[in-house]
Amino acid sequence: MNWLLRLRGLAWLCLNWAVGWAVAGLLIGVTSLVTPFLPWDAFFRVFDAPLPALGLPGFIGGAIFSILIGLAERGNKFEELSLPRFGAWGAAAGLLLSLVPAAMAAAGLATINHPEHGVWKLTALIGGPLTLLGAASGAASLLLARLARLWRTPLLQLLASE
């Protein structure tokens, strides 16, 4: 039963990160239209997929984050966890996520559009934004979990009284 709860938590975390990153992709697109004077070309040269497609790396990042939290914070109670600590674990998940394309290219599962730039230059280029998105998602995950816990307690009390 404990494994089912962990699996459910992993699935919800992955879905939350995927939705959050897809929304972030849409916001990037809207911001690029509103502020055309900023240098958006560099971003769009690297990320040439539709912007809501950021949900897929968000899903994978959520899985990495869930595994990191499960391993690193195993003995801690939920109330002991701090927002900066969750943000740091999220940043670590984003940084590890930036290594996924390099690992896929090394294994022969993917190719790079512009091989003249090299796989490590691409990894360095996507490392910063993925680390920032991971840190924000990690902190937001803790805030969302705390908010859900606040709502769940009165709801359970209300249901028990009926």
Image (cartoon, rainbow, N blue to C red):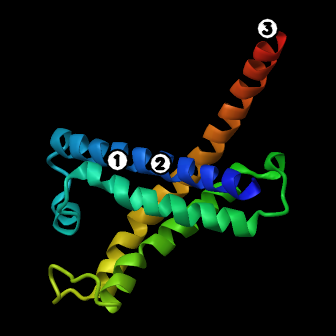
Q: Which secondary structure, mark 3? A: loop
Question: Would you name the residue on which mark 1 appears?
Answer: 22
Query: Which dot marks residue 162?
Result: 3
Farthest residue to the top: give it. 162
| Pointer 1 or 2: first along the chain | 2
Q: 158 left or right of 33? A: right
For this rendering, which residue is in front, 35 or 145? 145
For this rendering, which residue is in front, 31 or 75? 75
Could you give the CA–CA distance between mark 3 and mark 2, rounded to whole angstroms? Answer: 32 Å
Residue flagged by tag 2: what amino acid is it?
A: Leu
Q: Which secondary structure, mark 1? A: helix
Residue flagged by tag 1: what amino acid is it?
A: Ala
For this rendering, which residue is in front, 46 or 110? 110
Q: 79 left or right of 26? A: right
Query: Which dot marks residue 80?
Result: none
Q: Is residue 41 above or below residue 105?
A: above
Q: Which residue is at 39% across, 63% downward?
A: 129
Question: Would you name the residue on which mark 2 appears?
Answer: 15
Please state the horizontal and vertical placement of residue 69, each as a whole percent of the image.
68, 62
Neighbour class for label 2 at 10 Å: few (<14), some, many (≥20)? some
| Pointer 1 or 3: first along the chain | 1
Q: Which residue is at 25% across, 42% downward?
A: 31
Q: 23 left or right of 81? A: left
Please state the horizontal and vertical placement of residue 86, each as a whole percent of the image.
66, 56
Please state the horizontal and vertical placement of residue 118, each as a whole percent of the image.
25, 88
Q: Is residue 14 above or below residue 68?
A: above
Q: Is residue 126 above or below residue 28?
A: below
Q: Quadrant of the C terminus?
A: top right
Residue flagged by tag 3: what amino acid is it?
A: Glu
Is residue 91 visible in the rendered image? The answer is no
Q: Which residue is at 57% across, 45% downward?
A: 140
Neighbour class for label 3 at 10 Å: few (<14), some, many (≥20)? few
